[in-house]
Image: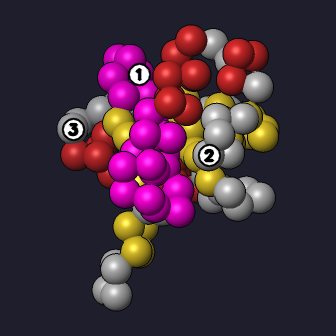
C-alpha cells in the first residue's frame, strides 16, 4: 500500500503514475538521485526505438549529470519490471517500488 512507503518513495509512485497517465503509456517510472532530485518518464514504443519507462527515467537522470540513484518506482500492470538499468548504473540494493496504475504497491524489489 502507498501509505506503507516513505513520503519520498510515495512521491516516486505518484510521479510515475502521472507520467504514465499523461501519455496513456504501458508504464511510468520515476527515479530519485543521490541529491534528492527526481526524474519521471513513460514507455517509448516507436517503430525504431523501444525504451522502458525505467530505462528512460535513468537516461534522463544520467543526461542531467547525476552520480548515483537512491530509489526508483515503476507503475505497470505487468507482473514484473526489468530493474537491470538501475542495477547497472547505481549498483546493488537500490529499492524499486512496483505499483499498479491505481497506486497500489505490489512489491518492493532491490537491485
- Tell me where residue 19 appears, x and y as whole percent: 40, 45
Above-or-below relation of 4 to 26: above
* Labels 2 & 1 near each other (Cβ < 8 A): no
Answer whether residue 26 is magenta in the image: yes
- Of marks 2 and 1, the one in the foreground: 2
Q: Which mark is residue 101?
A: 2
Q: Which residues are magenta?
A: 15-38
SS state under label 3: loop
In the rendered image, which residue does mark 3 sit on? 64
Between 40 and 66, the residue placed more toward the observer is 40
- Tell me where residue 66 appears, x and y as whole percent: 30, 33
Is the residue marked by circle 1 packed among few (<14), some (14-19), or many (20+) residues within 10 Å? Answer: some
Q: Pick whichever of labels 3 and 2 is earlier in the sequence.
A: 3
* Labels 3 & 2 near each other (Cβ < 8 A): no
Answer whether residue 27 is magenta in the image: yes
Q: Pick whichever of labels 2 and 1 is earlier in the sequence.
A: 1
Q: CA distance from mark 2 to mark 1?
A: 26 Å
Name the colouring of the figure.
Answer: secondary structure
Amino acid at each position: 500500500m502507498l501509505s506503507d512507503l516513505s513520503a519520498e518513495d510515495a512521491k516516486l509512485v505518484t510521479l510515475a503514475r502521472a507520467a504514465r497517465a499523461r501519455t496513456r503509456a504501458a508504464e511510468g517510472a520515476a527515479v530519485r538521485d543521490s541529491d534528492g532530485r527526481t526524474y519521471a518518464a513513460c514507455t517509448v514504443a516507436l517503430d525504431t526505438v523501444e525504451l522502458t519507462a525505467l530505462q528512460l527515467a535513468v537516461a534522463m537522470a544520467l543526461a542531467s549529470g547525476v552520480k548515483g540513484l537512491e530509489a526508483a518506482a515503476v507503475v505497470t500492470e505487468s507482473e514484473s519490471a526489468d530493474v537491470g538499468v538501475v542495477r547497472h548504473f547505481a549498483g546493488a540494493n537500490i529499492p524499486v517500488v512496483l505499483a499498479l496504475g491505481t497506486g497500489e504497491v505490489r512489491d518492493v524489489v532491490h537491485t
